């Protein structure tokens, strides 16, 4: 029942914080958010699942209760974690707590509502990463949109309304496409259930029947395409990425942290679960694999090029997310143990590092009131600790060894290079590696101009050092990044364990 | 309570009408109390009586439903008065819907009527209309159907025109009355044609006569059925008899709009489900399902497009309520006989969820009218900073009406569309889904105004009316809890709907 407790406590915390007076809301929200952190670490400590939850593996902390039965279909309260979902659960709880701390300085209106919505979002994220019944999962999946809409729309920057509505409409339409595609699959399977394991196993046993003139293979292809498009918006990959920079730039810092750190992972997590685990025979078609790999490489390169062209630090980090998530897609389509494992590892690593970068940019903005590269220089003189952490984080982003980003990217490149699924895999892998060069380019370029050199920011207010509670979450994230870089096995072993069955289906190697 | 106690041989069978009788008796008590001392106005007493009466009705309906009265397990439907009325699961389900909406509306009206004379009359009119609706759900004869429809409609006309010094209210009442009278006559004429063709007014007899074949009179029966459908289209505000709805909902006092657009509409569907499913066989050469397919598609599309172009929240809600009539019509449009009862059950469940979310939305408008902050989207701007809880409630209603997952409206719409797909009408579900996606646009405008827009001027909100506020919050909580608690609702609805199918 630990998962129910985790979700329930977070929902209750959201309610309590919502009703608390503004003065205490931030501190109270942080204190309460430590409960799910402890809970998720406890889950991690006692984790004993093996294999993939969807493919007859054992599931940890499983609960399966009947919810309702309609027209022969069972909907269940069905939750549990395996090696893929647990790291993301831990990431969600840890990042939420840190994001709440990072909100203490910038958020000064309607605090109780803000922190309440943050916790409400966290509860739903936990639901997304633990639900194993499609309906339950979809309820949580969509419920994440509601707090996000308000968090961007109420507390965001000058164009917040535009960004909030764009985000909401884009992702909602994407969800609809995915929902319809999934329904088309389930209705033509003999399973009377929305449980993801049953559906996966039935699909792989080839039990799909034809539907309105579409033979099973075509139906699978159509469903794969619609679901891929639906999740691609969330990830986002080029060309579905245009909502992201708007949402990121307008969102307040803590919300950007959650958006980049966890919400984007919902998309890649769902891709792994739904597209790549349930329909491997579609994904491994040479043409499909080529298209997906090409999309991944384009996302990597184009996202990085866009980041190179930005003048706003936050936009740079935002576009770099498009680039990093492209690596995840490349790792997934590789269908090797290292490829998919590295992609899953990258979800966590990017969650930590992009969270760190957004927070660091936020701290600098709190102090300088500007994010423009051209406006500032020599920040290292005024806020050495923050800048030090930011530089370390940037190195992590670039893939400096012994940082989480290096481990993830190494696994992905290694896995993609050896892929038997992507035609001319080495070519695609080599092309995507150019992304690293561009990443190093824009990060070094931006840092060199803003952080180093002579301090010259013309202001009529004092540029002072950041508060301890602004810098502390950065330090925690940096420590986590280094820990994962030095010892990837903290998560990588359980990830590989859950990946193996997926890879075995297509006969991919390690 | 032991279900055995509720069987006909233990209690007089007329007690099965308790949900309707409780409403009627409460209406009479209100008149009696008022006539004992007409000058003394004790609003709390009157509202209290009305609330207790409607809750009693809800209690009876819920108790009977859970005890299985009139359902297959306890000896089947209880027929009364020469089979003219029949109490079964479907009747009780709808009576529970009417009673809960009535209770919400009565509670909410307490503040709305605070400086208004004729409170007792208002409450008794509401309860008499509810009585008519309760009878509509139980009508097993076309004659009773007509009388019950009129009993529900006549008080409604008066309620719409209740603000007699307000030109809009009076005009709305007049329009409602004129179109109502017209469609009543269409309905009555349709009944007479069906009677002419089949020689009976009792629905099962009509079914047998039509199924046996009415040589030479099929055309007469078909025209009759078409005109009967017209009568329902009026009551449910479906195209092409929908023109009264935006005017009436806009002009009427907001609690009355809530009452009409939720309870009255559900009553129309209750009657339509029974009359068409029980009375008119599908395989007798008269394809009424096709008629409802056209009606459903046109109604939901027109309602949604019209709602998207409105500038006033109340009018938007009126048109969106037309759109929802279109969704509920799927119950009949995708009906295929036999297991097709499932889709009617889904429609019924949608109407129950709709009863809470739509009533709540109109009651929020009542709250806004009480505060006198204006009617357009712009007037609602920034309201969340002054009335956060009510705004949360309104956001819940809007997202739920749009069918977004964390709320009850998601499941009710999902099962409706899934029922249509199961019955083989995937295109109907597709039209519904597209409409539903479109509706998010105008529902989110309200949410945007409340939370994201900044207030144009400083507004001072008068005191918060406790009862109205409580009703709004209660409806929101119910809408939210209907998602996890949807299992008993859909299971009950589908099981009672399936037993009605002959």
Image (cartoon, helix red, strand yellow):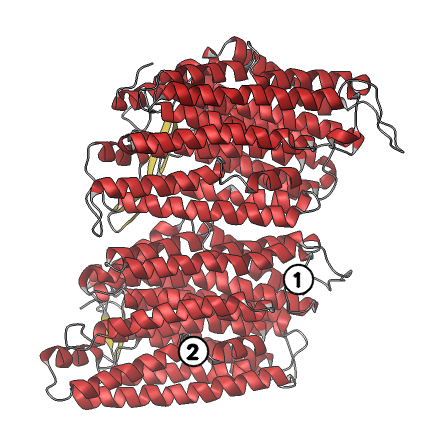
Q: Residue furthest right?
A: A460
Chain under numbered label 2: B
- Quarter occupied by residue B76: bottom left
Give the vertical position of B11 relative to A210 (above or below): below
Tell me: A338 left or right of B466: left
- Tell how many labels: 2
Return the x and y of residue B232 as percentages of the image width and height. 35, 78
* Residue B380, disc: 1
Find disc 2 in the rendering and name its residue. Answer: B24
The residue that appears at 58% across and 86% down in the rendered structure is B170
User: Depth-wise, is mark 1 or mark 2 nearer the camera?
Assistant: 1
Q: Position of residue A196 (x, y in %)?
A: 32, 35
Q: CA distance from mark 1 to mark 2?
A: 38 Å
Q: Are marks 1 and 2 on the same chain?
A: yes
Pick whichever of labels 1 and 2 is earlier in the sequence: 2
Quarter containing the C terminus of chain A: top left
């Amino acid at each position: 029942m630990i998962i129910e407790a985790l979700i329930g406590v977070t929902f209750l915390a959201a309610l309590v914080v919502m009703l608390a007076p503004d003065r205490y809301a931030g501190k109270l929200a942080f204190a309460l958010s430590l409960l799910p952190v402890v809970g998720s670490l406890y889950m991690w400590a006692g984790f004993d699942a093996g294999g993939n939850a969807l493919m007859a593996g054992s599931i940890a902390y499983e609960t399966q209760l009947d919810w309702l039965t309609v027209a022969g279909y069972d909907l269940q309260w069905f939750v549990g974690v395996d090696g893929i979902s647990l790291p993301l659960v831990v990431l969600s709880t840890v990042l939420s707590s840190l994001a709440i701390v990072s909100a203490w300085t910038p958020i000064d209106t309607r605090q109780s509502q803000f922190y309440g919505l943050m916790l409400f979002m966290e509860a739903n994220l936990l639901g997304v990463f633990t639900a194993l019944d499609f309906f339950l999962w979809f309820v949580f999946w969509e419920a994440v949109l509601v707090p996000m809409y308000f968090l961007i729309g109420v507390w965001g920057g000058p164009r917040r309304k535009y960004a909030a509505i764009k985000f909401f409409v884009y992702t909602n339409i994407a969800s609809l496409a995915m929902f319809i595609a999934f329904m088309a699959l389930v209705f033509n399977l003999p399973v009377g259930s929305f449980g993801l394991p049953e559906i996966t196993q039935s699909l792989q046993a080839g039990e799909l029947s034809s539907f309105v003139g579409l033979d099973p293979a075509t139906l699978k292809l159509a469903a794969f395409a619609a679901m891929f498009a639906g999740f691609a918006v969330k990830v986002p990959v080029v060309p579905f990425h245009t909502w992201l920079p708007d949402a990121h730039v307008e969102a307040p810092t803590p919300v950007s942290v959650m958006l980049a750190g966890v919400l984007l992972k919902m998309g890649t997590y769902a891709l792994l679960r739904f597209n790549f685990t349930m329909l491997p025979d579609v994904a491994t078609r040479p043409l499909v694999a080529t298209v997906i790999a090409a999309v991944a490489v384009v996302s990597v390169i184009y996202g990085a090029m866009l980041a190179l062209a930005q003048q706003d630090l936050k936009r740079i980090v935002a576009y770099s997310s498009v680039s990093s998530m492209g690596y995840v897609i490349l790792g997934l389509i590789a269908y090797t143990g290292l490829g998919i494992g590295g992609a899953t590892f990258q979800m966590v690593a990017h969650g930590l590092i992009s969270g760190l970068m957004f927070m660091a940019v936020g701290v600098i903005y709190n102090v300088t009131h500007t994010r423009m590269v051209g406006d500032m220089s020599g920040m290292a003189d005024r806020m050495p600790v923050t800048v030090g952490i930011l530089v370390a984080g940037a190195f992590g982003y670039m893939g400096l060894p012994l940082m989480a980003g290096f481990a993830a990217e190494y696994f992905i490149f290694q896995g993609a290079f050896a892929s038997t699924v992507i035609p001319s895999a080495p070519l695609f892998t080599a092309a995507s590696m150019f992304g690293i060069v561009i990443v190093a380019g824009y990060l070094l370029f931006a840092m060199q101009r803003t952080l180093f050199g002579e301090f010259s920011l013309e202001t009529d207010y004092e540029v002072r050092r950041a508060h301890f509670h602004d810098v502390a979450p950065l330090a925690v994230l940096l420590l986590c990044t280094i820990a994962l870089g030095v010892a990837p096995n903290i998560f990588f072993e359980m990830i590989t364990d859950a990946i193996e069955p997926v890879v075995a289906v297509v006969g991919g190697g390690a | 309570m032991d279900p055995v106690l509720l069987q006909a041989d233990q209690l007089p069978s007329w007690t099965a009408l308790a949900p309707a009788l409780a409403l009627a008796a409460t209406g009479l008590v209100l008149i009696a109390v008022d006539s004992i001392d007409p000058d003394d106005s004790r609003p709390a007493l009157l509202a209290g009586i009305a609330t207790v009466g409607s809750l009693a009705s809800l209690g009876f309906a819920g108790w009977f439903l859970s005890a299985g009265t009139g359902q297959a397990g306890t000896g089947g439907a209880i027929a009364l008065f020469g089979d003219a009325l029949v109490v079964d699961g479907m009747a009780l389900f709808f009576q529970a819907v009417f009673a809960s909406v009535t209770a919400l509306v009565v509670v909410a009206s307490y503040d709305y009527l605070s400086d208004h004379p004729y409170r007792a009359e208002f409450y008794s009119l509401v309860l008499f209309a509810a009585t008519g609706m309760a009878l509509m759900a139980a009508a097993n004869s076309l004659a009773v159907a007509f009388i019950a429809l009129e009993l529900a409609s006549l008080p409604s006309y008066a309620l719409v025109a209740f603000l007699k010094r307000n030109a809009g209210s009076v005009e709305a009442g007049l329009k409602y009355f004129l179109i109502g009278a017209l469609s009543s006559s269409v309905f009555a004429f349709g009944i007479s044609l069906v009677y002419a063709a089949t020689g009976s007014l009792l629905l099962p007899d009509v079914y047998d006569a039509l199924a046996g074949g009415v040589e030479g009179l099929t055309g007469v029966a078909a025209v009759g059925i078409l005109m009967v459908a017209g009568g329902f289209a009026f009551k449910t505000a479906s195209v092409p008899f929908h023109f009264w709805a935006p005017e009436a909902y806009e002009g009427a006092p907001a609690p009355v709009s809530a009452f009409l657009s939720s309870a009255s509409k559900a009553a129309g569907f209750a009657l339509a489900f029974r009359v068409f499913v029980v009375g008119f066989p599908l395989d007798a050469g008269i394809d009424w399902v096709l008629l409802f397919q056209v009606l459903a598609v046109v109604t939901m599309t027109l309602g949604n497009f019209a709602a998207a172009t409105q500038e006033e929240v109340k009018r938007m809600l009126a048109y969106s309520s037309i759109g929802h009539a279109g969704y509920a019509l799927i119950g009949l449009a995708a009906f295929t006989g036999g297991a097709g009862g499932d889709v009617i059950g889904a429609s019924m469940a949608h109407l129950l969820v709709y009863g809470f979310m739509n009533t709540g939305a109109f009651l929020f408008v009542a709250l806004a009218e009480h505060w006198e902050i204006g009617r357009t989207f712009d007037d609602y701007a920034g309201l969340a900073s002054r009335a956060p809880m009510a705004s949360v409630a309104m956001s819940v209603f809007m997202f739920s009406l749009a069918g977004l997952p964390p709320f009850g409206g998601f499941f009710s719409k999902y099962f409706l569309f899934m029922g249509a797909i199961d019955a083989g009408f995937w295109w109907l579900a597709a039209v519904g889904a597209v409409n539903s996606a479109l509706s998010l646009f105008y529902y989110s405008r309200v949410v945007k105004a409340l939370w994201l827009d900044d207030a144009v001027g400083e507004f001072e909100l008068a005191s918060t009316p406790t009862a109205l506020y409580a009703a709004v919050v209660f409806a929101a909580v119910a809408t939210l809890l209907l998602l996890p608690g949807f299992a008993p609702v859909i299971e009950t609805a589908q099981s009672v709907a399936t037993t009605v199918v002959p």
